[in-house]
């Protein structure tokens, strides 16, 4: 099943291109709207996060997101 999602609101203008999901996950983490180059550098230093994919796959960020989701589901 094909799925179409508009991710432009999630990305800075410079990265709002017609990228495949695979290519988008390879872009630098500062491509995310609201993440500065300085923030990206701190993520790199602290967690070796360089790309959007790295951020999404990071076990600490995934654990935190799962806990928030559980709390939201519990109401």
Image (cartoon, rainbow, N blue to C red):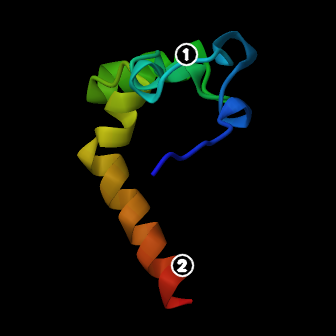
Q: Quadrant of residue 45?
A: top left
- Which of the pair 48/8 is nearer the observer? 8
Distance from the alpha carbon under mark 2 to that under mark 1: 31 Å
- Which of the pair 35/21 is nearer the observer? 21
Marking on residue 28: none
Q: Mark 2 or 1 closer to N-term?
A: 1
How packed mark 2 is, by other alpha carbons closer than 10 Å (few <14, some 14-19, many 20 or more), is: few
Q: Of all residues shown, which one is farthest toward the front? A: 1
Coordinates of residue 12 in the picture (x, y in percent): 70, 21
Count numbered badges in the picture: 2
How packed mark 1 is, by other alpha carbons closer than 10 Å (few <14, some 14-19, many 20 or more), is: few
Marking on residue 38: 1
- At horizontal 73% and vertical 35% (from top left) the residue drawn is 9
Name the mark nearer the viewer: 2 or 1: 2
Q: Of all residues shown, which one is farthest toward the top? A: 14
Q: Is residue 30 left or right of residue 63?
A: right
Q: Quadrant of residue 38?
A: top right
Circle 2: element type: helix
Residue, disc 2: 72
- At horizontal 30% and vertical 40% (from top left) the residue drawn is 57
Coordinates of residue 37 in the picture (x, y in percent): 56, 13
Coordinates of residue 66 in the picture (x, y in percent): 37, 65
- At horizontal 64% and vertical 15% (from top left) the residue drawn is 15
**Would you place residue 66 above or below residue 24 in this image?**
below
Q: Are marks 2 and 1 in contact (CB under 8 Å)?
A: no
- Which of the pair 75/3 is nearer the observer? 3
Q: Which quarter of the rendering shows the C terminus? A: bottom right
- At horizontal 36% and vertical 18% (from top left) the residue drawn is 50
**Would you place residue 66 above or below residue 51 in this image?**
below
Circle 1: element type: helix
Coordinates of residue 58 in the picture (x, y in percent): 29, 41
């Amino acid at each position: 099943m094909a799925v179409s999602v508009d991710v432009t609101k999630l990305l800075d203008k410079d990265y709002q291109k017609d990228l495949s999901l695979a290519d988008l996950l390879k872009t630098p983490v500062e491509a995310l709207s609201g993440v500065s180059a300085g923030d990206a550098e701190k993520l790199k230093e602290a967690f070796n996060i360089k790309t959007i994919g790295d951020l999404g796959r990071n076990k600490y960020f995934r654990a935190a997101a799962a806990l928030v989701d559980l709390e939201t589901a519990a109401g």
